[in-house]
Image (cartoon, rainbow, N blue to C red):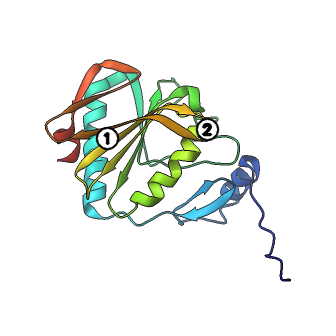
Amino acid sequence: MDMPAPRHRFTLDEWHHIVESEALRNQRVELLDGEIYEMTPIGPPHQSVVDRLNDLLGRTFGNRVIVRVQGPVPARPRSEPQPDIALLRRQTDFYRKAHPEAPNVFLVVEVAETSLDYDHAKLRVYATGGIREVWIVDLRGDRIEVYRDARGDSYGDLRIAERGESLSCLAFPDVALAVDDILG
């Protein structure tokens, strides 16, 4: 009987050593459950929504948060996804010494043009890592999926926000964002 070759699952410390060594320089990759995944290329509609969200969230929240664009967000124990947008607790050093941990992440947003299945698979990583809220902007479905209430490796609450509606982040229920402003 042939046994499959064992796979090595990287820890976050091992991953950080690889990143620091620049072995993966100029490659769009992220660590999920200890495995390195290539990220899908970014097309114009995807980038447009990321830019729109960056502008909208920056103008809306001002100095209340840091809007991180396509940067690492550790999700313990073996993952460091790079969501399209992360809304972070404001720190004066802008997380110079370490990437933000889950308690400092108010919201993660993934934009899905061709990556919807992949982004759905990442939900388990976010839930396990303690990320309290995830939005998936589904460009093909022309809607936003809102996931809340992390329970183990999944989310207990899903809401679909359509055009003409608005939504708020759990951390800032007083701020409503129009779905149309996000989707463009």
Q: Nearer the viewer, mark 1 or mark 2?
A: 2
SS under mark 2: loop
72 relative to 117, above or below: above
* For marks 1 and 2 on the same chain, the one whose residue lies earlier in the sequence: 1
184 or 97, which is in the foreground? Answer: 184
Residue type marked 2: Gly
The residue at 61%/54% (across/down) is 32
> Label 1: which residue?
54
Label disc, if present, on residue 129 of the rendered structure: 2
Name the quadrant containing residue 38.
bottom right
Q: Residue furthest left?
A: 164
161 or 59, which is in the foreground? Answer: 161
3 relative to 158, above or below: below
Residue type marked 1: Asn
Q: Residue furthest front?
A: 1
The residue at 58%/46% (across/down) is 125
